[in-house]
Amino acid sequence: MDHEFFGFGDGFRVLIPNPPAIPNFRDIFLPIRRKNRDEPNGFPVSRFLTPPPSEYLCVLCQNVVKKPLECRKCGKLYCDSCIAGLQIVDESSCNKAFSCNACGCSQEPRQPSQVLLRMITELKIKCVHFDLGCQNYITIEEMNRHELVCPYREVLCGNFRHCKKSGLIKDFIETEAVTRSIYSHISNRAGSGRGKCYTCSENCKKIVAFDKLVTDKQHHKALLEYYQVLLSLTEKEMP
């Protein structure tokens, strides 16, 4: 068993068994993806608030293009990931070459105009967590930001070392986490500048808070937190 000693002056030290480790980002925050949410390369037409123009559909997957590329000759659109399926091997050079499925053009596809890209990203799409209860329609441009903090997103409890519960963000408690650098891209949008995770109960929240204090080497605060927890348990046991 691993142990770590923390000193508090005058020779007084607290022994912490199994010192907290920095959590793995994938273990505690990424949603539990369901197979029925797995999507093809583009965005399914059924997810949109209004039927999107046919010009915005990928020639191959027939969904609204994701990371679109445009044929230089006919202007048809392809998802970036769908292009790989059209690449053929040029026997003379052993290099992969593009061949448009609509017109046969072999020129390398190009990025669409900024105007077209803006029109596509302004389409309103249903949140990917709609099957769990989210009723929001957001633009493609806002989609990633919304789905990252959507109340109906599935997460694992931030106290992942001792708790294996999972649930929706709306049912969990937002908690300050030790993985500040991992969550900075999320928290900066909210202006907090601190890392966040989600815990399933007050007990798990306290454990995560204690882990943070120890990891941040705020030993006096950690000792006070530990003392307050012991005091509350003692009071409950008193007749």
Image (cartoon, grey):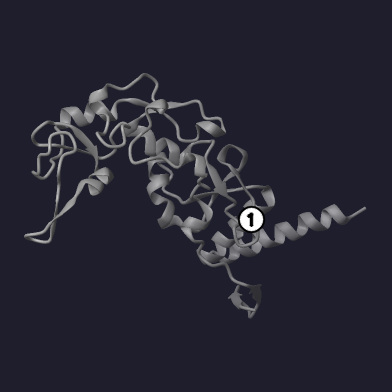
Seen in the picture, residue 61 relative to 194 is either above or below; the reply is: above
Quadrant location of the N terminus in the rendered image: bottom right
The quarter holding residue 168 reads top right
Residue 102 on image: x %, y %: 17, 34
Q: Is 114 placed left or right of 9 in the picture?
A: left
Seen in the picture, residue 33 relative to 66 is either above or below; the reply is: below
Residue at x 38%, y 45% (from the top left corner): 188
Q: Nearer the viewer, residue 219 or 126?
A: 126
The amino acid at mark 1 is Lys
Residue at x 50%, y 25% (from the top left corner): 135
Q: Residue furthest top?
A: 50
Residue at x 89%, y 55% (from the top left corner): 238
Q: Is 28 placed left or right of 186 in the picture?
A: right
Q: Disc 1 designates what residue?
A: 164
Q: Nearer the viewer, residue 41 or 9?
A: 41
Q: Nearer the viewer, residue 160 or 15?
A: 160
Q: Is 95 placed left or right of 139 in the picture?
A: left
Residue 59 on image: x %, y %: 24, 34
- Alpha-carbon neighbours of circle 1 within 10 Å: few (<14), some, or many (≥20)? few
Q: Residue furthest front?
A: 91
